[in-house]
Image (tube, rainbow, N blue to C red):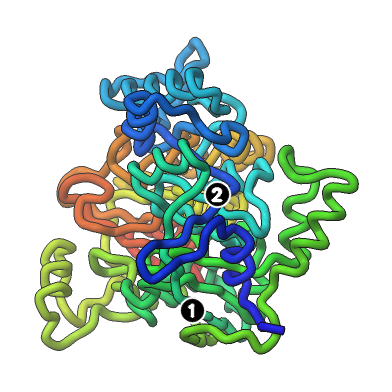
């Protein structure tokens, strides 16, 4: 019998028509997640061609990218003052009503970042194929799903056919041995992986993360790792479902129940890569040797341990340009570098466990004078849970802003952004030029490092503050 990887099993289980020398494969899509930014043109295409949505029940929409995260007004509504954002939000409401798609509208109980609400609602399940018009759809691979971002044209294609044309990617196994040391998080792990293999290291591949350090991660930590697979150039990132996966999903609104749950478990347990199955490439890493990580340049692969220095020697054109933009120099240490803004949020690090980490560090401490801190929960559910645990009070007492759910400062299109020249430590996933605002300069880091930096007013090693 042929030994197959997790990817092989999911891919082959969704083939409508295999790839040929002349044509890509046709892949069936189990779940299509939609948001307000990449969908308007796709819906317009449906209207122009007189098409409906093929499987409305397998399509779910939310508002997250352009939505403001400012506090609600006296009427209980979240004010939308930007005309473009208002137009995108209005278009999604209209399109979902017209085509019969379930929508979690701004401020509603289920609304939030698309890659946060999918798992928390139990929509994301092992063995699924999942697509969304967003790069970080790979987040859902933490559940053993094959999940990847698609373009606006492809969004329209999936709406109309519930299928997608795809070339079969190669496979890359990343095995992580050991255990993460104290003060080192899943965010540090994925930054270390990207620094090791480079931003093109996963190009053309689906990554399977495996090994004891991966198995020890919680589901929310696994989502953080898979979320940033695209930053290594990978098509997707996956992890085999296990008991932690099943425990997380049990009882969630859209998870199977009763006999259907038992049947699903039997199928899910068979998804793990077969012993001896071959990957196209393999990479290994020792988690126990890792330290808190931070980026220094303008892509996530430009990352070093927080006590390290910017690489020396001839920086070359790409690195030289990045250092010029960041206002840094070869050999410079980042520890102690002054910071203007700290952002804790995004589809990478806005879940309840992320907020607990940050609040645990901030409790009884104050944000440094002159530093602005935004804490943005990933969903309304996360927001309610955090408030139920008193985390919002911890953040406010420390001097941070507690916001509504949304993508916020991860992407400067919703009112939350840096001013030119400002430095931010951010728990998001991209540090590209202008990503958080024109001229804004971003250091990517974990929630723990971000919280420690907020207190110090400069880039800090969280290990010095852990109680």
* Left or right, 303 with reference to 69: left
Q: Residue at x 50, y 48 (%)?
A: 163
Q: Work out whether 331 lies above or below 357.
A: below
Considering every residue shown, the one lying at the far right of the view is: 259
Mark 1: secondary structure: strand
* Left or right, 138 with reference to 215: left
Q: Residue at x 62, y 33 (%)?
A: 57
Query: Which comes before the other along the chain, label 2 or label 1?
Result: 2
Q: Quadrant of the C terminus?
A: bottom right
Mark 2: secondary structure: loop
Q: Work out whether 327 lies above or below 389.
A: below
Residue 167 lies, in percent from the top left, at 41, 65
Q: Work out whether 128 lies above or below 315.
A: above
Q: Residue at x 75, y 69 (%)?
A: 270
Real-space Cα distance between discs 2 and 1? 22 Å
Residue 283 lies, in percent from the top left, at 48, 86
Q: Can you see residue 61? A: yes
Residue linked to disc 1: 172
Residue 307 lies, in percent from the top left, at 36, 78
Q: Residue at x 39, y 58 (%)?
A: 429
Q: Work out whether 465 lies above or below 152.
A: below
* Left or right, 57 with reference to 159: right
The foreground one among 302 and 15 is 15
Residue linked to disc 2: 29
Q: Residues within 10 Å of mark 2 (few under 14, many from 20)?
A: many
Residue 116 lies, in percent from the top left, at 55, 46
Q: Can you see residue 364? A: no
């Amino acid at each position: 019998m042929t030994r197959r990887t997790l990817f092989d099993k999911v891919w082959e289980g969704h083939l409508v028509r295999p790839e040929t020398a002349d044509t890509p494969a046709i892949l069936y899509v189990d779940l299509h997640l939609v948001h307000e930014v990449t969908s308007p043109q796709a819906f317009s295409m449906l209207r122009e061609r007189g098409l409906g949505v093929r499987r409305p029940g397998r399509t779910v929409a939310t508002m997250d990218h352009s939505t403001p995260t400012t506090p609600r007004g006296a009427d209980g509504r979240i004010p939308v003052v930007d005309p473009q954002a208002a137009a995108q939000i209005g278009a999604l409401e209209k399109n979902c009503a017209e085509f019969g798609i379930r929508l979690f509208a701004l401020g509603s109980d289920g609304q939030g970042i698309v890659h946060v609400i999918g798992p928390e609602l139990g929509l994301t399940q092992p063995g699924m194929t999942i697509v969304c018009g967003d790069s970080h759809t790979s987040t859902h691979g933490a559940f053993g799903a094959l999940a990847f971002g698609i373009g606006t044209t492809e969004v329209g294609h999936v709406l109309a056919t519930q299928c997608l044309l795809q070339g079969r990617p190669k496979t890359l196994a990343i095995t992580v041995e050991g255990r993460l040391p104290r003060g080192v998080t899943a965010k540090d792990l994925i930054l270390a992986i990207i620094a090791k293999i480079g931003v093109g290291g996963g190009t053309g591949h689906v990554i399977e993360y495996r090994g004891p350090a991966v198995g020890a991660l919680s589901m929310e930590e696994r989502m953080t790792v898979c979320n940033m697979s695209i930053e290594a150039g990978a098509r997707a990132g996956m992890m085999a479902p296990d008991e932690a996966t099943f425990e997380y999903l049990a009882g969630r609104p859209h998870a199977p129940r009763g006999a259907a749950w038992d049947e699903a478990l039997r199928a899910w347990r068979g998804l793990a890569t077969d012993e001896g199955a071959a990957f196209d490439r393999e990479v290994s890493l020792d988690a126990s040797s890792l330290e808190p990580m931070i980026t220094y340049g303008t892509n996530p692969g430009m990352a070093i341990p927080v006590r390290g220095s910017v690489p020396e020697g001839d920086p070359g054109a790409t690195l030289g340009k990045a250092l010029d933009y960041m206002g840094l120099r070869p050999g410079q240490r980042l520890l102690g570098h002054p910071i203007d803004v700290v952002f804790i949020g995004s589809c990478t690090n806005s879940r309840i466990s992320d907020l607990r980490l940050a609040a645990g560090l901030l409790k009884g401490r104050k944000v440094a004078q002159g530093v602005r801190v935004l804490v943005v929960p990933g969903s309304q559910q996360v927001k309610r849970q955090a408030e139920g645990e008193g985390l919002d009070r911890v953040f406010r007492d420390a001097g941070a802003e507690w916001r509504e759910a949304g993508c916020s400062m991860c992407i400067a299109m919703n009112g939350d952004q840096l001013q030119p020249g400002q430095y931010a430590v951010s728990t998001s996933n991209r540090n590209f030029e202008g990503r958080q605002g024109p001229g804004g300069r971003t250091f990517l880091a974990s929630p723990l490092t971000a919280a420690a930096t907020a207190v110090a007013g400069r880039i800090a090693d969280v290990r010095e503050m852990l109680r």
